[in-house]
Image (cartoon, grey):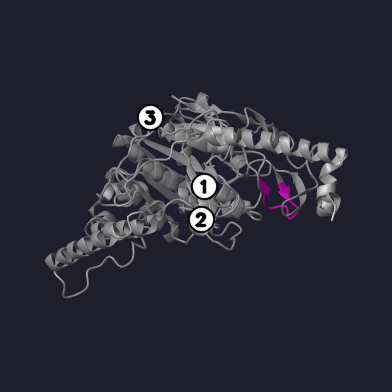
Amino acid sequence: MNEAETISPFGHRLLDRRHFLKNTAGALGGLGLAQLLSAKEDDPTAFSGKLPIRPQFDPDNPYAPRAGHFDAPAKQVLVIYCPGAVSHVDTFDYKPDLYQFHGQKPPGMPAVTFEGPTGNIAKPFWDFKPRGESGKMTSDLLPRMGSLADDFCFIHSLHTQTSAHPQGENFMNTGFTMEGFPSFGAWVTYALGSACEELPAFVAINDPRGLARSGKNNFGNGFLPAAFQGTDFNAKNPPANLRRPQGFSASDDRKTVDLLKRLNAKHLESFPKDADLAARIASYELAGQMQTSVPDMMDLSKEPESIHKEYGTDTGTELKREYAKNCILARRLIEKGVRVVQLFNGSDPSGGNGITNWDSHSNIAETHAMQAEIMDQPTAAMINDMKRRGLLEDTLIVWATEFGRMPFLQGNGTGRDHNPEAFTCFLAGAGVKKGFSYGQSDEFGFKTAVDPVEVYDFNATILHLMGLDHERLSYYHNGLERRLTNVHGHVIKDVLA
């Protein structure tokens, strides 16, 4: 057998000059790519120019307070979230041109939007008036909140990536339109822990009517350790299973808890790196502490009559009275040192069309008015109360919704459709300018026109006010350094005090 017969057909191709040069070029290119990838892997600053910071915490004590990336004015945050999309052109974004073009169809307006054919331009359903020393124009839909305009920092040029409620809620609260990502509150408590040992680090106070459209995803932990998910309860529905069984004394209960703690610690020694087990044990231990702290926290009868009157717990509809109690509860939680409190004004995982949230596709004059009656007095009272007690010196207040509403009516002539191209949110309290407005939508409130702000920027700014660099706060998951702002976002420096 000669030498040629021992070489395989593939071997003959390698000896061919044309194929040899082709394979050599491919191999050298692969080596170069591998070197580049290796350099990026070794240099975690290759993308953002900053080293990621993954907070170091003890799984046995995940809620212990931790330092931020830098000193910051805000130590706690209260998020007031309004599911359903509040109409900016009927509340805080004054557009005189809507009066001038009322009933007309100016050029440039789309023929079809999210829910079908569009109608004509509609002026605001409520009059706008100047408020406070700043003279900020806000509508009579929310007069009590408008009276606090000198304390607010409005952002009028927000825009988002989606016009659907579930995705919009996800995007505003988790930084992604898809489910499964950590909520803002989870990121903050993962980074900072909590100064309160008797209560959860992150509490979600759901609307009296139930969960919002995206449900627990709005305050979930996603892929972060389970310890950092929000604990949801409200004034009407306290945390379940905290009552001591009949026949057990406080001493019996304490001895039981101590025994369980010793048994749990011994079990954990066998699984020192099991974060889920540690989180589960920490949750049970926190529940034990909550047995004594939560009943006192939930007892709103200890509040003076003047507070109940100020918040409106004894006037208006039952929904308004229950929401007012939630507002008192939110203030009490902030007073106790809870790191993140998320207060919902609106609900309904299956929709609602303005009945259970702000989604007013029809009869906006009635449905928005109903939601405003629930929100206005209690929310304004809560902010005033926090200011009076000095809580705004260390607490950031965030008022947000997932997108805005159109300046024109829908085909039905009574409601406004979803508008992801422009909407308004505001900040108040620690670290932000007072009586200030940033950015502008166009003359109709249809699209952003001056200093557009992405949701990524909004969340980056809130993290910054909490002492966290959004480009560095990360969690390694499935081969990626995950962030609340993904790979986007800039701090809105002009709103910082």
Q: Name the residue that disc number 2 marks.
A: 217
Q: Secondary structure at mark 3?
A: loop
Question: Which label sits on residue 211?
Answer: none
Q: Are marks 1 and 3 in contact (CB under 8 Å)?
A: no
N-terminal label among 3 and 2 = 3
Magenta: main secondary structure equals loop
x, y percent for residue 329: 33, 51
x, y percent for residue 446: 69, 38
The C terminus lies in quadrant: top left
The amino acid beneath tag 1 is Asn
Question: Which label sits on residue 173?
Answer: 1
C-alpha span from label 1 to label 2: 8 Å
- 10 Å neighbourhood of mark 1: few (<14), some, or many (≥20)? many
x, y percent for residue 334: 32, 44
Q: Secondary structure at mark 2?
A: helix
Question: Which label sits on residue 72?
Answer: 3
The N terminus lies in quadrant: bottom right
Is residue 310 shown to the viewer in this render? yes
Q: Is residue 16 above or below residue 465?
A: below
Q: Residue at x 86, y 38 (%)?
A: 17
**Front one among 248 and 434:** 248
x, y percent for residue 220: 46, 54
Q: Are marks 1 and 2 in contact (CB under 8 Å)?
A: yes
Q: Is residue 376 left or right of residue 406?
A: left
C-alpha span from label 1 to label 3: 22 Å
Quarter of the image where one finds residue 252 = bottom left
Magenta residues, as a range? 409-419
